[in-house]
Image: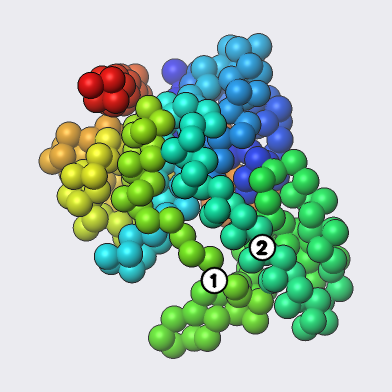
């Protein structure tokens, strides 16, 4: 049984449609697949219906683009088994989606002013089936217009680097105010889901786990394309210490994938999934009480 608990569609920042993602999942013999688009649940009902036709159990999910303001680092929180369109998720995530889309419009304008021959209309077409424009869509337009041959290459850093103490931000960078990770955890629980700390190795989120557990964290992503053996070991140790479910997934983004992963390339076993289901049931009981 292949269980992939982290996968995107073009409802956020995957180049593949829901249909194409599920066809690929079926080809890869996936039994359970979590659709976890960024800051939206808009495609979940369609995915669940299509999954039934392909004998794939779709786990309704979300990935919230959050921030750990105490430690000053990005933090992504997965929500697994969430209720699609739940008011708590929409209230939290809708402003984030709108801000990201508006920032993408400003970034595109900056590029045009700098002499890049792209248009907002072209970028919009590449994102027309989703909830807004991402930097990946802008890079896709730049590829189509001959400026580069990759999404995440030197040009991406030149244009969109966030900046640090040594290097100034990229020429088109526009900051976006990310959601508080604690708020994300609370919203996911209100929506009946299990909050899971996504790929903690990517942003070095390990030290935040005790505080996140107090807020209601129920799981930690152990198996991820960006995790090495040391990251997996740290995540497993934290899961054992704080009785967290251990999850894993491909984090598939189609043409916009920067790891080469495909659906099913990272997965978990039945026992780990059973613990995740226990966490889901516990969340449901806490909501009812």
Res. 93 in view: yes
Frontmost of labels 2 and 1 is: 2
State the SS at label 2: helix
Q: Which label belongs to residue 175?
A: 1
Q: Which label belongs to residue 102?
A: 2
Tell me if mark 1 has few (under 14), some (14-19) or many (20+) residues whose alpha carbon lies within 10 angstroms of its own.
some
Residue 118 screen position, x and y as percent:
84, 68
Q: Quadrant of residue 142?
A: bottom right
Q: Which label belongs to residue 58?
A: none
Disc 2 versus disc 1: distance between alpha carbons?
Answer: 11 Å
- For the point 74% across and 49% down, the residue is 127
Q: Quadrant of residue 7?
A: top right
Res. 250 in view: no
- Placement of 233 over or under 6, stated as above or below: below
Viewer-nearest residue: 102 or 160: 102
Look at the image and name its color scheme: rainbow
* Furthest residue in direction left, as rendered: 241
State the SS at label 1: loop
Which part of the image, by quadrant, shows the C terminus?
top left
Residue 207 screen position, x and y as percent:
22, 58
- For the point 49% across and 86% down, the residue is 167
Which part of the image, by quadrant, shows the N terminus?
top left
Viewer-nearest residue: 168 or 190: 190
Residue 128 screen position, x and y as percent:
78, 46
Give whichever of discs 2 and 1 has the lower sequence position: 2
Viewer-nearest residue: 92 or 81: 92
- Placement of 204 over or under 41, stated as above or below: below
């Amino acid at each position: 049984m292949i269980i992939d608990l982290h996968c995107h569609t073009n409802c956020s920042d995957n180049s593949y449609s829901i249909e194409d993602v599920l066809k690929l999942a079926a080809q890869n013999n996936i039994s359970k697949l979590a659709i976890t688009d960024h800051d939206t649940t808009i495609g979940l009902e369609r995915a669940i219906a299509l999954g039934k036709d392909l004998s794939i159990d779709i786990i309704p999910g979300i990935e919230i683009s959050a921030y750990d303001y105490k430690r000053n680092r990005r933090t992504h929180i997965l929500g697994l088994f969430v209720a699609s369109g739940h008011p708590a998720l929409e209230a939290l995530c809708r402003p984030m989606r709108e801000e990201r889309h508006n920032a993408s419009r400003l970034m595109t304008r900056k590029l045009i002013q700098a002499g890049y021959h792209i248009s907002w209309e072209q970028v919009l077409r590449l994102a027309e089936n989703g909830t807004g424009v991402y930097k990946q869509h802008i890079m896709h337009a730049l590829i189509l217009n001959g400026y580069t041959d990759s999404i995440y290459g030197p040009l991406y850093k030149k244009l969109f680097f966030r900046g640090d103490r040594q290097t100034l931000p990229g020429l088109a960078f526009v900051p976006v105010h990310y959601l508080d990770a604690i708020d994300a955890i609370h919203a996911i629980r209100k929506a009946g889901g299990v909050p899971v700390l996504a790929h903690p190795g990517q942003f070095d989120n390990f030290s935040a786990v005790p505080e996140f557990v107090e807020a209601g964290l129920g799981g930690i992503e152990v198996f991820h394309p960006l995790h090495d053996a040391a990251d997996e070991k740290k995540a497993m140790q934290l899961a054992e210490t704080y009785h967290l479910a251990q999850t894993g997934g491909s984090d598939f983004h189609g043409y916009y994938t920067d790891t080469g992963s495909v659906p099913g390339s990272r997965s978990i076993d039945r026992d780990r999934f059973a613990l995740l289901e226990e966490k889901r049931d516990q969340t449901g009981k806490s909501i009812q009480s």
